[in-house]
Image (tube, rainbow, N blue to C red):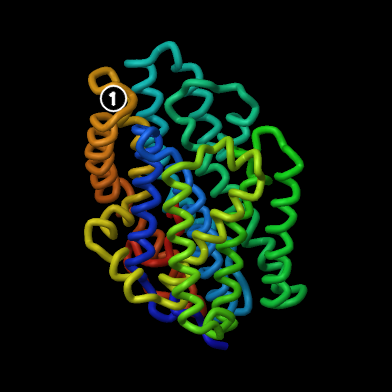
Amino acid sequence: MVLGVTQRRGYVPALDGLRALAVLAVVMSHCWPQALPGGWIGVDVFFVLSGYLITSILVAEHERTGRISFRIFYTRRALRLLPALAVTLVLGVLIAYLLYPASAGDTVREAFAAAFYVANWLVTSGQVHSGLLVHTWTLSIEEQFYWTWPIVLYLLFACGGRRAALAATVALVGLVLVHRITGVPGAYFRTDTRADSLLIGCGIALAAPMGVFHRLPMTVVRGAAVAAAASLLAMLAVVQQASLLMTGFGYTLIGIASATIVVAVAVRPLGFVVRALELRPLTWIGRRSYGVYLYHPLCLALLAPRLGIEGPPAFLGTLALSLGAAAASFRYVEAPFLRLKDRAMVQRRSATVAVKPGSQFRSLFS
């Protein structure tokens, strides 16, 4: 069976470039929302990337071995995600007590929820309002996906193979969409109403090895990529969270547009898209995007007393400090565990894929 381009060729720098654009959009939406009202869309891009890359790992392993090693998978996730998260939670609580004592209680509750990856449900419940760690809700959705998807995928493979898994994934996307448009309270932060973007990425990873996208003419791929990019840029410029939340279909459309870009980058690469996303500054930021996302609210909190919480100075100052913090974290906190993570990847000869720290097989927050 033919594997997709991503699995055959390994590291795809353009995916790091896409990750960089997504995290920059999120940072701007938090620091300078007037300039980029739809910057929150970067979170959905992250979700699609996570679904695609994590499922690519699982599909490749199942193709080689006929099974999925849950022990290795969960060990690798913990080694990648927990060290930087632990630093973030400790720093967040310290900054809250030192500079924002009025909201320290909320920050502590957020830290405990984030440590157990249930922060999104804490936010949905309305129990926190002004803590410094609200942004960990996205990590919680990611981790809940990591807990469940490998098991679900293995069962789908066991019951009906890859085609059945793809059909079930498409059906699950539809189920999430129908569930959300019924008007579920707090839908923006809930796992059951935001899982469609993750599942769309999973569907891309399942369909790619079947050659589904290789049957499409390149003119179709090119036209779809241009339309998807234009749609995402338009939404970044004008769309507020509430407006898409009310329509219900918006999050799914963002997921489909993001997945179209992923296909044009990693499955049926388009030269002009790949070259734009492979610019060295973008790939550098993309490899450190997990740290940038984790630390940027804390950097904004440190700078806010002098620069304010919104506007160009807040954005530029927060971005510079976040990049520095992410670079230090990547080198001194994350890299040692990345090396352990990669050793876990090659523990079993039958499942060996030799990779270097920071390789292509990273999810959004991985």
State the image coordinates of residue 258 (x, y, percent, origin top left): 49, 59
Amino acid type shown at disc 1: Leu
Q: Residue at x 23, y 56 (%)?
A: 281
Q: Work out whether residue 309 or residue 158 is closer to the camera in this orientation and state it.
A: 309
Asked which secondary structure carries label 1, the reply is helix
Q: Work out whether residue 48 or residue 28 is closer to the camera in this orientation and state it.
A: 28
Quarter of the image that includes the N terminus: bottom right
Is 52 situated left or right of 356 in this image? right
State the image coordinates of residue 11 (x, y, percent, origin top left): 36, 71
Q: Which residue is mark 1?
A: 302
Tell me if I can see residue 314 in this picture. yes
Q: Residue at x 34, y 61 (%)?
A: 358
Quarter of the image that includes the C terminus: bottom left
Q: Residue furthest top?
A: 102
State the image coordinates of residue 209 (x, y, percent, origin top left): 55, 80
Residue 318: quadrant of the picture = top left
Q: Residues within 10 Å of mark 1 (few under 14, many from 20)?
A: some
Tell me if I can see residue 352 in this picture. no
Q: Is residue 242 above or below residue 360?
A: above
Q: Residue at x 39, y 40 (%)?
A: 36
State the image coordinates of residue 53 (x, y, percent, origin top left): 49, 64
